[in-house]
Image (cartoon, rainbow, N blue to C red):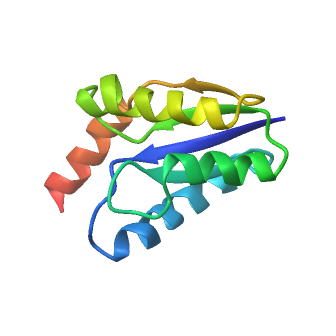
Amino acid sequence: MKGILVVAHGNKEKETGTIFDTILSMVKVQLPETIIEYACLKYSERTIERGIATLAARGITEIKIVPYFLFVGKHLKVDMPYMIVQCAHKFPDIQITIGEALGIDRRLADILVDRIKD
């Protein structure tokens, strides 16, 4: 069974979790059959390891990690792969892959245009 773990940087602000929950609720409306959790690299109890453990407890055997990052930098090149390797040792029966950063996407430009016009 497949699951998704959306991973963001994280933030010390308390509303970060609420915002992420809201965004993922919107995603889940569009993908109702998909099991989705989220995690943060920093400043949150919702770590990658905890996210993988949560999905594993739901019977997930294949996890696609989707980075909620605009750019590929140190976190995506070094930190996240390191954390995933550590988790792979703890969850050897789970296949884990990493997707792409948000990157260049016309829809992101459209959002920026909306913000500029506001």
* Residue at x-position 38% and y-position 29%: 101
* Residue at x-position 27% and y-position 68%: 12
* Residue at x-position 36% and y-position 68%: 16
- Vertical relation: 36 (above or below) 18: above
Horizontal side of 99 relative to 110 (left or right) equals right
Q: Where is residue 67 in the image (x, y as percent from the top left)?
A: 44, 36
Horizontal side of 25 relative to 110 (left or right) equals right
Give the position of the C terminus as an image quadrant: bottom left
Quarter of the rendering containing residue 83 = top left
- Mark yes or no: residue 7 visible: yes
* Residue at x-position 64% and y-position 40%: 4
- Mark yes or no: residue 103 visible: no
**Image label count:** 0
Give the position of the N terminus as an image quadrant: top right
Q: Where is residue 117 in the image (x, y as percent from the top left)?
A: 16, 56
Quarter of the rendering containing residue 81 = top left
Q: Nearer the viewer, residue 26 or 49?
A: 49
Q: Nearer the viewer, residue 26 or 89?
A: 89
- The residue at the far front in this view is 89
